[in-house]
Image (tube, grey):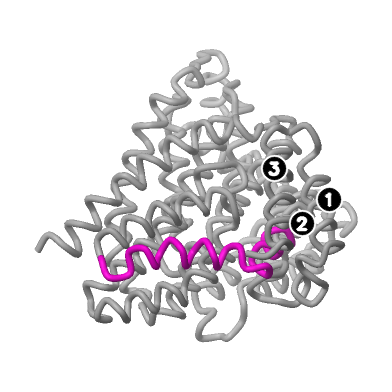
């Protein structure tokens, strides 16, 4: 690597340390780091704003913006309160069963949608449930975002890296479902058990609050029935369009923006008022982070690391699988997994071809997918959904620190990636 590459690494490491220690606001750090990368020439305007591989991922930004507008309208209907009361009553006010319901719902929905959309919809409900029952919301929010990243691993559309892998490898939606979904179900069960242990202090039972919640009528929470119907129609259309994006040839970001703007226009609400609910700091943080990671991609840092790791085990399929799995998990915990997978895909394609290009060699694609998707749980900035939930929590007055998230995320990541080792061996090597 050249001098500029080492400077880019230094800038990224310093920025990451500042984000982790929270000495400076994370948005300011991301923007500062991005500015330095641009000023030093580690990246440029063309790469930062227009490159799919090393620039701001506008699809992610506008997908988030569109869904945030839909959520902003939905919040004014009372629907989140309705769902919150319903969930609390179904669990009879017991905190742990409520967490289990939220984990299962989040994991399943994340497999059908992208994980960011799911947490945008579920997080407001969670905040309301916890407020009603007088329990701390942070453990519930962390559990949900962990479930969203695990659930999103199950399908081709659940996590953006899977879409990149599918386009490069030729693997189909059914391939992802048959190989990854059974494993994801096991990991979700493990997550529930881990949450019972990790968050045991959060499961306080307040009999008086529970009695008040049980006495509530869900329907009384609805404030605008016309807007509820309209919002659900638009949301349903958006979700259907998400699942049919390969047929419609519309990017999810375009679908989300069309849905958000259409609903905002038809709702008759004050657009300025709804826009206040958009997590603007989160969107700006993402933009800065994308530019910083783009600097590492443009200067060849990510490519150098990837090639060095894979060349060492190019002709050894099982060691290559293990290295790819754990290296992907580790790097995805630090940098966004989208540019990482975009960089690694052509290298993995070469390894698969060198290993015979048969069904057994396809294990390398699954190692990349599992490592990149599950590794996103390790830190507060490892996946888009993590950053979004931290922003929602902070806006609601419940700040989740970098280490407050990471100390739980690391445990879940290490255990889930460890479980992937015997699964891949049994599936592709044992028989």
Q: Is residue 278 visible?
A: no
The image position of residue 191, as x and y in percent, is 38, 38
Residue that appears at 38% across and 59% down: 324
- Please state which of the two labelled residues, at mark 3 or mark 2, is closer to the viewer: 2
Identify which residue, 253 or 241, lies in the foreground: 253
Q: Determine whether, in the image, residue 242 is placed left or right of residue 4.
A: left
Q: Measure the C-alpha gap from mark 1 to mark 3.
A: 23 Å
Looking at the image, residue 38 lies above or below residue 106: below
Check disc 3 and report its element: helix, strand or loop.
helix
The image position of residue 260, as x and y in percent, is 73, 66
Looking at the image, residue 356 lies above or below residue 183: below
Q: Quadrant of the N terminus?
A: bottom right
Residues at marks 3 and 2 touching, judged by CB atoms closer than 8 Å? no
Residues at marks 2 and 1 touching, judged by CB atoms closer than 8 Å? yes
Q: Which residues are magenta?
A: 291-316
Q: Determine whether, in the image, residue 374 is placed left or right of residue 385.
A: left
Quadrant hosting residue 131: top right
Residue 32 badge? 1
Q: Is residue 157 visible?
A: yes
Identify which residue, 42 or 236, lies in the foreground: 42
Check disc 1 and report its element: helix, strand or loop.
helix
Residue that appears at 36% across and 56% down: 323
């Amino acid at each position: 690597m050249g001098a500029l590459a080492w400077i880019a690494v230094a800038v990224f490491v310093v920025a990451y340390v500042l984000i982790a220690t929270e000495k400076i606001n994370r948005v300011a750090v991301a923007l500062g780091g991005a500015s330095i990368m641009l000023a030093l020439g580690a990246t440029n305007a063309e790469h930062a704003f227009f490159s799919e591989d090393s620039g701001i991922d506008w699809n992610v930004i506008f997908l988030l913006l569109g869904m945030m507008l839909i959520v902003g309208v939905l919040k004014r209907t009372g629907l989140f309160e309705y769902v919150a009361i319903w969930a609390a009553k179904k669990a009879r006010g017991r905190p742990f069963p409520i967490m289990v319901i939220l984990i299962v719902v989040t994991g399943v929905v994340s497999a059908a949608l992208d994980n960011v959309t799911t947490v945008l919809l579920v997080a407001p409900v969670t905040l309301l449930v916890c407020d009603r029952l007088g329990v701390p919301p942070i453990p519930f929010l962390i559990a949900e975002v962990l479930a969203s990243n695990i659930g999103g691993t199950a399908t081709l559309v659940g996590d953006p890296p899977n879409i990149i892998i599918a386009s490069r490898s030729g693997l189909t939606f059914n391939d992802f479902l048959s190989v990854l979904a059974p494993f994801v179900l096991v990991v979700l069960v493990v997550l529930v058990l881990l949450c019972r242990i990790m968050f045991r202090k959060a499961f306080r039972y307040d009999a008086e609050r529970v009695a008040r919640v049980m006495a509530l009528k869900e329907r009384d929470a609805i404030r605008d029935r016309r807007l509820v119907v309209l919002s659900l129609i638009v949301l349903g259309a958006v979700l259907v369009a998400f699942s049919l994006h390969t047929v419609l040839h519309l990017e999810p970001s375009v679908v989300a923006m069309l849905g958000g703007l259409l609903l905002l226009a038809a709702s008759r609400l004050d657009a300025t008022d709804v826009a206040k609910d958009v997590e603007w700091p989160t969107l700006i943080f993402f933009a800065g982070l994308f530019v910083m990671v783009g600097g590492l991609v443009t200067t060849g840092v990510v490519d150098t690391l990837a090639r060095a790791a894979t060349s060492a085990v190019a002709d050894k399929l099982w060691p290559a699988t293990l290295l790819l799995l754990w290296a992907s998990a580790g790097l995805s915990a630090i940098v966004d997994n989208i540019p990482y997978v975009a960089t690694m895909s052509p290298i993995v394609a070469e390894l698969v071809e060198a290993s015979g290009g048969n069904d057994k060699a396809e294990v390398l694609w699954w190692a990349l997918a599992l490592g990149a998707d599950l590794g996103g749980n390790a830190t507060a900035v490892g996946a888009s959904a993590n950053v979004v939930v931290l922003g929602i929590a902070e806006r609601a007055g419940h700040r989740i620190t970098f280490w407050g998230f990471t100390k739980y995320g690391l445990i879940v990541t290490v255990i889930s990636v460890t479980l992937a080792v015997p699964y891949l061996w049994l599936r592709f090597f044992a028989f």
